Amino acid sequence: MIETLVTCNAQDLLCQLNSLLELEVKCQPKACGLRLIETAHDNGLRMTSKLRDFEVKDLLSLTQFFGFSTETFSLTVNLLDRFLSKMKVQPKHLGCVGLTCFYLAVKAIEEERNVPLATDLLRISQYKFTVFDMMRMEKIVLEKLGWKVKATTAVYLLKLYHSLVFDNLTSERKKLFSPERLETHLKACHCRIGFSKAKPSVLALSILALEIQEQKLFELMDVMECLQNHSNISSRDLHCWKELVGKCLAEYASSKCSKPNVQKLKWIVSGRTARQLKHSYYKVAQLPTIPESGS
């Protein structure tokens, strides 16, 4: 039993895990809709995976700029992909859809005092549509998603899995197993539409398994097997997605891979614009890119 492999806090964590596992399939993007996007030709009229991925990278830049949590970014991606997998969105409307999903996620996750004004959000993102356009799009997105904003995303499961195995390490080995590093890897995966086809539990456990393999934390193999069985994840699925995660991280770390557009936000927040924004905005002076996956 998994309870014998973790601390006495395991029961509470397992209850949370069970609840998330029950809910994870209810707010997933439609796989058939995502496949249509992946196979679409770039003719300027249809949504493509390349356009979607560029939009998500811009939303990651905004997330980092405001200092928002990984939970906010994961929910943003979930909302965006759920909408794109249901609706035929023209490329010219993608920016409005993306920023609207970001704003919905911010309002759902972040503290109210940290939620930016829509006017400031538009100014920083440099989109040409208006607040009215954004509010109208918000209503459309909510209606198409059945007014279900909250969702079980991979970041929640990743944190739970990490907590369940962390205490099985010695103090020295715990330094090799950073939750921030795992979240960083998840952000990289979110920038590829293909990973939105995976169940959140599968993606989260795949990221965890790859990190354990790369850091040579072999003492965690037994508890990982228990978590895999508890989550009803097949060895084939875990192996397949772990390989895809490893490939994604290797490609993201390469110089050929485009990173979130940092300079665009650095340029726009200056002078008069900066003086008009709340002091709680732009919490990070430097926007970090996702680091290499190697140790």
Image (cartoon, helix red, strand yellow):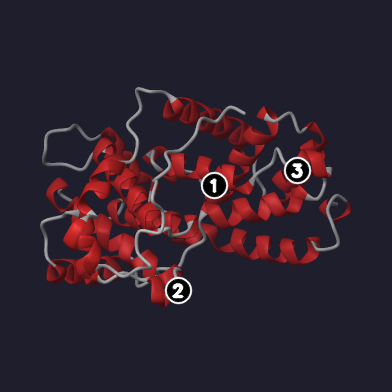
Comes first in the chain, label 1 or label 2: 2
| Residue tagged 2 | 111
Q: Quadrant of residue 22?
A: bottom right
Q: Amino acid at mark 3?
A: Lys
Q: Quadrant of residue 279?
A: bottom left
Q: Which mark is residue 58?
A: none
| Residue tagged 3 | 174
Answer above or below: position of 39 versus 33.
Answer: above
- Left or right side of 208 for 155: left
Q: Residues within 10 Å of mark 2 (few under 14, many from 20)?
A: few
Q: Which mark is residue 183?
A: 1
Element under disc 3: helix
Quadrant where the C terminus is found in the figure: top right
Q: CA distance from mark 1 to mark 2?
A: 20 Å
Residue 76: x and y, percent?
38, 57
Residue 186: x and y, percent?
51, 44
Residue 153: x and y, percent?
50, 56
Q: Quadrant of residue 66?
A: bottom left
Q: Amino acid at mark 2?
A: Glu
